[in-house]
Image (cartoon, grey):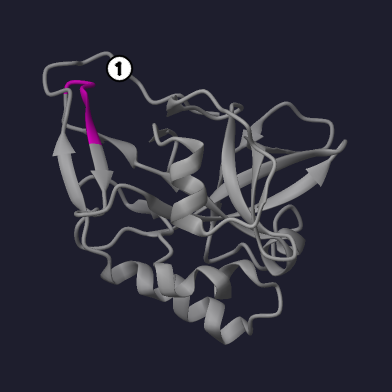
Amino acid sequence: MCGRFMLDSDIEDLIREYKILKRQVDNYEKGDIYPSQNAPIVMYDNGRALKTAKWGFTLSGESKLIINARSESIAEKPMFKNSFHNTRCIIPVNLFYEWKNEGNKKKVKHEIYLPGRNITSLGGIFKIADNKLFFVIMTTEANSYMNGIHSRMPLIIEDYALDYWLDNKTSNNTIEEIIKSNSSHELKIDRVNEANSFEQMKLF
């Protein structure tokens, strides 16, 4: 899964990175981004647009926050399927975090990112409710780099696939191929908090 990420890039860096045509983000709180917080996302709005959205979907009448969507079932689940087919997005991150259980209730923190890249594009979906944007991050089975840390990993979208991912007219076969390609991403994983037995990932 993906329960926390870090984004410390300037808005102007994001605009250059994604060749943004429409901007509705003036600033955001840099650093670690938690569920329920706002973050910049890239979406399609007559060209690539940068907007602010809140991390997490909620079920009607419930307070539980859903922050990830599994790629294997996203196209069928009522909460996700309309967004998956019509409103896919990119969540820019510098890195994301995962915690590995190492016995004695110890969770060891790891920073994970694409080597040689300052910004990594995570694949997600968004929806509009009460005139506000909300997003979740898609996940797949962990690839060979991640499976020693966790069984799941966020979907990473390569530059060549950005427009295919954002365009709701892209064929289902192409979207499936983009999702399958997640198994091939080389990742850099840095162990961070080796001695900390108490730090827990914020779960919802």
Check disc 1 and report the residue beneath it.
199
Rendered location of residue 43, percent (x, y): 64, 56
Residue 85 shown left or right of residue 187 in the figure: right
Q: Is residue 200 above or below residue 38?
A: above
* Three-letter amino acid code of the residue under disc 1: Glu
Residue 141 shown left or right of residue 23 in the figure: left
**Picture quadrant where residue 149 is located:** top left
Q: Residue at x 44, y 54 (%)?
A: 17
Magenta range: 104-110
Q: Identify the secondary structure beneath mark 1.
A: loop
Rendered location of residue 129, percent (x, y): 83, 41
| Numbered disc total | 1
Is residue 5 rendered magenta in the image? no
Rendered location of residue 172, percent (x, y): 62, 82
Foreground pick, 186 / 158? 158
Q: Is residue 1 visible?
A: no
Foreground pick, 113 / 71? 113
Q: Residue at x 68, y 51 (%)?
A: 126
Rendered location of residue 16, percent (x, y): 46, 53
